[in-house]
Amino acid sequence: MPEMFDVALPIVLAALLTFASLRAFRHKRRLVRWGVGSIAALLTLIATITSVFALAGLSRLNAHGAPAVSPTIAGTAEQVQRGHEIADGFCSGCHAPDDITATLTGDRDLGRHLPLPLGSFVAPNLTPAGRLARWSDGDIFRAIRNGVDPGGRRLFIMSLTNASGLSDDDTKAVIAYLRSLRADGRDTGATPDRFSLLGLVMLGAHLLPEAKPVPTGVVIAPAKAPTAEFGEYILSYQDCRGYHGKALTGGVPGQLPPLGPDLNVVKVWSFDQFAATMRTGVDPTGHELGKEMPWRPIGRMSDDELRAIYEYLMHLPAS
């Protein structure tokens, strides 16, 4: 458990400060007894509270188990191709080492994009060069659907995404595609997530977002077509709502991801303008999309998928 050393620091500090405050309160000089003793006692309290919340955070981090599953992966060419489409348009947003390619070799520290130093969260290598080669198909299914690793430890960034919205068939397709990849890149390690002490304290104090709710039944996707219904499904697993708000009418100040604008703006664009924006990173007014906007993965989607998203956005409620 990589965070144990960080948790031990405030515990040891609290013990040392307790000893120091007791010594100070026994001192003959009043200034030392009440001045130094009071300061030491206050610091002891702070260190103790920090320790309690850090331990609570560590406990919560390892309390996200999920039932074992044994999905059947056919590995047909059609299934692998569907998995490739999803990986290009969704998984590559985090697991590609840069924005240009869709190679899923990971090794990007996603913690650098968070507004607070909560820790290091390295996107793992999803090719057979990484840890997934040692995972079962059921382990990968649970990581996507439940946001946990084989040991039940919460995959923090993964648990905040909407990956659980992928249908059972599409989740199996992603697994089939990952199994078809050749080994590439380096192994990012067994536990690439590492919370900082601040991250653990905030997690223990319930100051960080909870893991997304996990569907308990079978998730079925609508027929793949350039329709608003299929567009709604795509946006159910994409992370647009994390940036643009639950109704896609604009982000809310204080949210963990960067604030995204009201997507009603798309209603004045033609489909060609929308598709060009997703594929060039420049909207019809000449405004360049921010680096936080994963337009490149979305732009890798087919015309039918982009059309489906566009049709869904055309029916957004007015903000």
Image (cartoon, grey):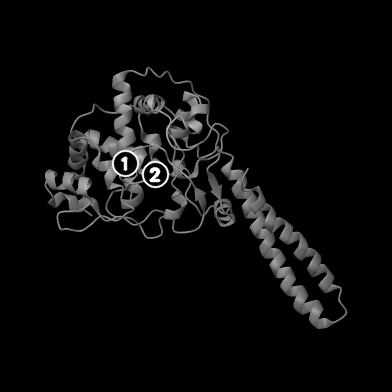
> Hey, what amino acid is under mark 1?
Thr
Q: In the shown orientation, is residue 40 left or right of residue 70?
A: right
Say which residue label 2 marks: 97
Question: Marks 1 and 2, Cα distance to the nearest angstrom?
Answer: 8 Å
Q: Quadrant of residue 52?
A: bottom right
Where residue 138 sits in the image (x, y, percent)? 48, 25
**Is 269 on the left-hand or right-hand side of 93?**
left
Label 2: how many Cα within 10 Å (few below 14, some 14–19, many 20+): many
Along the line of sight, which residue is nearer the eye, 36 or 303?
A: 303
Residues at discs 1 and 2 in contact (Cβ within 8 Å): yes
Q: Nearer the viewer, residue 191 or 66?
A: 191
Specify the amino acid type for callout 2. Pro
Residue 143, image x and y in percent?
47, 33
What secondary structure is marked by label 1? loop
* Quarter residue 198 falls in: bottom right
Q: Decide: is 134 above or below 257.
A: above
Q: Is residue 316 visible?
A: no
Helix, strand or loop under label 2? loop
Check residue 101 in the rendering and tell me which mark sits there, or answer none. Answer: 1
For residue 199, what is the image quadrant?
Answer: bottom right
Residue 190, given in percent of the width and then of the height, sits at 55, 37
Q: Where is 214 relative to 193, above or below? A: above
At x 53% / y 34%, what residue is drawn?
A: 149
Residue 277 screen position, x and y as percent: 19, 49
Please give the label number shown on residue 114.
Answer: none
Q: Residue at x 13, y 52 (%)?
A: 268
Asked if residue 27 can be seen in this view, the reply is: yes
Front residue of 15 and 206: 15
